[in-house]
């Protein structure tokens, strides 16, 4: 049995902005109802960032909590990756702003843009650094203020999204190379750019010169979601040398309860093993997996040594999955 370096998650943290926006609050602004939103999506409420909050502010709070749990100080951090689609500025990267606000010394800091799949992509990048000995204390953050991308006259999209941030600390640990190791065991990353028109933002610095608004063909995205996500989960599990049946907790991207249920059913994962926060947070894009992860750890369901399967799908279309043992 050879010895390998694995990337272990040693701390998880989350931050949610204070303001709660319920479905009933939205029904006062647009032609919708709590019943429609809940039946179609499972969403009851979402959080909205204060006007003076930027994505980096949410990211910093989540990172502080994850570092506290890991017993690490910002001065020890040597890599920051922020998965976001709602950066503070066109540049610098939100990760550079987070570095300054946290007081992290000079080190690689950059953003990963894979929309709702961003956290899964960012974890795989962090694994590349940590497992190669290039980082001993990485912070991977998913942070979004999706409410700033909404067209508040489009009821088909504006009811679905919310704001928040989640973070993990990733550190090296030695393993045997088997599926019984702690740490990141395997992942699958996918993108099909031909499906760009199904989910995108209609603005950008080199096209319209504006930020733009989120546009989605919801039914079409839904149609691809269950099949694509299930495929990525199976691929990640295979690469990790683990069986889907052995997963302790399934931590999906929180877009729609019906998608969560559909994927779990297709993969034969019982409802009791699925972490679902979509009712409370709505779709927070790249933040949704670490937010759900933190929730599961904080309430004592997710424990060290357990096998976790993270998955997501979003604009691009991108999708992917990560298998890891905590
Ligand atoms: O994280 C990125 C991934 N994104 C997703 O996973 C989203 C995937 N898609 C979905 O979750 C669902 O497609 C939605 C929740 C977005 C929509 O559910 P649907 O069952 O596909 O509804 P629909 O878009 O086909 O619309 C059905 C009806 C329409 O009315 P008509 O044309 O049948 O008269 C819509 O106008 O529902 C109407 N509708 C609404 N009614 C009340 C659309 N949005 C609303 C609303 N309130 N907010």
Image (cartoon, rainbow, N blue to C red):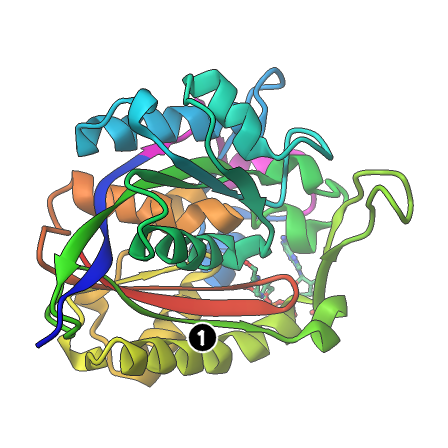
Direction from residue 308 to residue 175 in the image, left or right: left
Taking 85 as reference, is 191 above or below it?
A: below
Q: Quadrant of the N terminus?
A: bottom left
Closer to us: 32 or 187: 187
Toward the viewer: 199 or 242?
A: 242
> Counting other residues with Cα less than 10 Å from the Cα at mark 1, is it few (<14), some (14-19), or many (20 or more)?
many
Residue 240 lies in magenta, yes or no?
A: no
Q: Find numbered disc 1 in the image and state the secondary structure of the residue it sits on.
A: helix
Q: What residue appears at the point 41 percent right and 30 percent down from the top-left corner?
A: 16
Q: Is residue 300 above or below residue 195?
A: above
Residue 285 as seen in the image, left or right of residue 29: left
Q: Is residue 120 above or below residue 223?
A: above
Q: Mark 1: is the Cβ under 8 angstroms from ligand 1? A: no
Instruction: Indicate the position of residue 139 as horizontal and vertical percent values.
Output: 37, 38
Which quadrant would residue 229 be assigned to in this image? bottom left
Q: Position of residue 283 (x, y in %)?
A: 50, 50
**Residue stretch in magenta:** 14-31
């Amino acid at each position: 049995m050879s010895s390998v370096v694995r990337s272990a998650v040693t701390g998880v943290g989350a931050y949610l902005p204070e303001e709660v926006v319920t479905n009933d609050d939205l029904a006062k602004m647009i032609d919708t109802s709590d019943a429609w939103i809940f039946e179609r999506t499972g969403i009851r409420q979402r959080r909205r960032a204060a006007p003076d909050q930027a994505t980096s502010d949410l990211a910093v709070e989540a990172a502080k909590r994850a570092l506290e749990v890991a017993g690490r100080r910002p001065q020890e951090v040597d890599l920051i990756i922020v998965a976001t689609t709602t950066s503070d500025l066109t540049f610098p990267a939100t990760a550079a702003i987070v570095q300054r606000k946290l007081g992290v010394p000079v080190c690689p800091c950059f953003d990963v843009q894979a929309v709702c799949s961003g956290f899964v992509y960012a974890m795989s990048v962090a694994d590349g650094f940590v497992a190669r000995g290039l980082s001993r204390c990485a912070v991977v953050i998913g942070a979004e203020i999706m409410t700033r991308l909404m067209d508040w006259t489009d009821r088909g999209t504006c009811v679905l999204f919310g704001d928040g941030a989640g973070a993990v600390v990733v550190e090296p640990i030695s393993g045997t190379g088997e599926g019984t190791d702690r740490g990141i065991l395997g992942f699958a990353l996918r993108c099909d750019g031909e499906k760009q028109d199904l989910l995108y933002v209609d603005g950008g610095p080199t096209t319209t010169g504006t930020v733009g608004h989120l546009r989605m063909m919801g039914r079409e995205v839904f149609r691809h979601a269950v099949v694509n996500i299930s495929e990525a989960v199976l691929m990640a599990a295979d690469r990790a040398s683990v069986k889907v049946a052995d997963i302790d907790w399934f931590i999906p991207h929180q877009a729609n309860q019906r998608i969560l249920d559909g994927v779990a059913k297709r993969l034969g994962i019982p409802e009791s093993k699925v972490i679902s926060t979509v009712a409370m947070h709505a779709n927070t894009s790249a933040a949704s997996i670490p937010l759900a992860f933190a929730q599961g750890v904080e309430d004592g369901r997710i424990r060290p040594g357990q096998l976790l399967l993270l998955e997501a799908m979003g604009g691009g279309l991108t999708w992917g999955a990560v298998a890891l043992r905590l």
